[in-house]
Amino acid sequence: MAVEQPTGTPVTPAGDQTRIHDIGYRNYDGPRLGRAYARRSLYSQSLRGAYGLGRSVKSKVLPMLIFVVMCVPAAIMVAVAVATKAKDLPVDYTRYAIIMQGVISLYVASQAPQSVSRDLRFKTVPLYFSRPIEPADYVRAKYAALASALFILTAAPLLVLYVGALLAKLDFTDQTKGFAEGLVSVALFSLLFAGIGLVIAAITPRRGFGIAAVIAVLVISYGAVSTLEAIADAQNNTGAIPWIGLFSPVTLIDGVQTAFLGATSSAPGAVGPGSGQGVVYVLVVLGLVAAAYGLLLRRYKKVGL
């Protein structure tokens, strides 16, 4: 039985359907901003992200809350000093970050994984390296951004204390000297904590694991060292206390500022390192910072392959 073919538009052979369209692709003739611009952009974006800027409202809650928690005690101390007309602040500038080290550790634990874990989880790191940026640029930008964010977090309450001290008409020279020493202390604090946090966070693409690992390293190390120092003090072995302090980031910074910034040690019996031991503390801090940078660079060279 014959089948009738429908009448209408004739069927066009497949080869005749090919068309060439000029869709306007042209070479880019604008300025080439290069690696330095890319590095600055990554740094700026990472620094803003450390406080949730440019992200959702939910992402802003924790970093902003931690910032407020860091500054409120300083504001209360200033108010008390002004009201009571005290001759000095309740807390030295170099002691404030040591007292608030738990809050600082929480900030590092929350923001270090946010800075690097998402890029690892979504495999966007190779996309960065397809542009002029290189692994060293990526590591420097991320490290500098988190260290800057930590410096802002730790220096802001010191600024509150300093302004309050001047309003309370405390001695200008003493307060300025203490404020400068405090800034040096928190700068070292920021470099060390940022390096440790980023190295731990870069190990795993899972943000939750990164947060738990950073908290464990910072908190457990401080608790263990404090316990050993207390045992050494109870056994009258005070000579061992400064050497025990080398094994925790918090006590490392405490030892450096005790040896060179005129701070009072937080170790049992206020037994801090002398100037000779302080040199060892400085070398260990700088070594850890350099090691953190080297480990990060090695990690991202492998990821970018």
Image (cartoon, grey):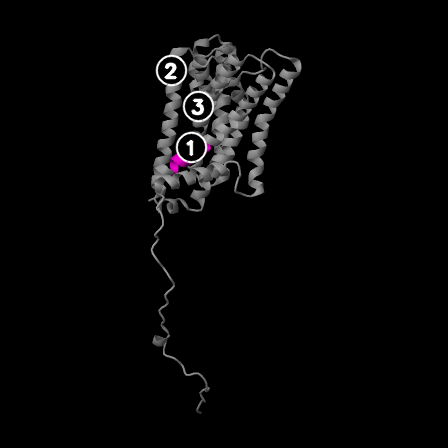
In the rendered structure, the answer to whether residue 114 lies left or right of residue 293 reads right
In the depicted view, which residue is nearer to us: 150 or 167? Answer: 167
Q: Residues within 10 Å of mark 2 (few under 14, many from 20)?
A: some
Quarter occupied by residue 294? top left
Of labels 1 and 2, the one closer to you: 1
Residue type at mark 2 is Val
Residue type at mark 1 is Ala
Q: From mark 3 to mark 2, how far is it between C-alphas?
A: 14 Å
Q: Residues within 10 Å of mark 3 (few under 14, many from 20)?
A: many
Q: Quadrant of the N terminus?
A: bottom left
Magenta residues, start to end: 138-146
The mark nearer the N terminus, 3 or 2, is: 3
- Is residue 116 something one can see in this rendering? yes
Residue type at mark 3 is Leu
Q: Residues within 10 Å of mark 1 (few under 14, many from 20)?
A: many
Q: State the mark number for residue 279.
A: 2
In the displayed orientation, state which residue is furthest to the top.
Answer: 236
Q: From mark 1 to mark 2, how far is it between C-alphas?
A: 25 Å
Q: From mark 1 to mark 3, how far is it between C-alphas?
A: 13 Å
Q: Secondary structure at mark 3?
A: helix
Q: State the mark number for residue 144.
A: 1
| Residue position for label 3 | 188
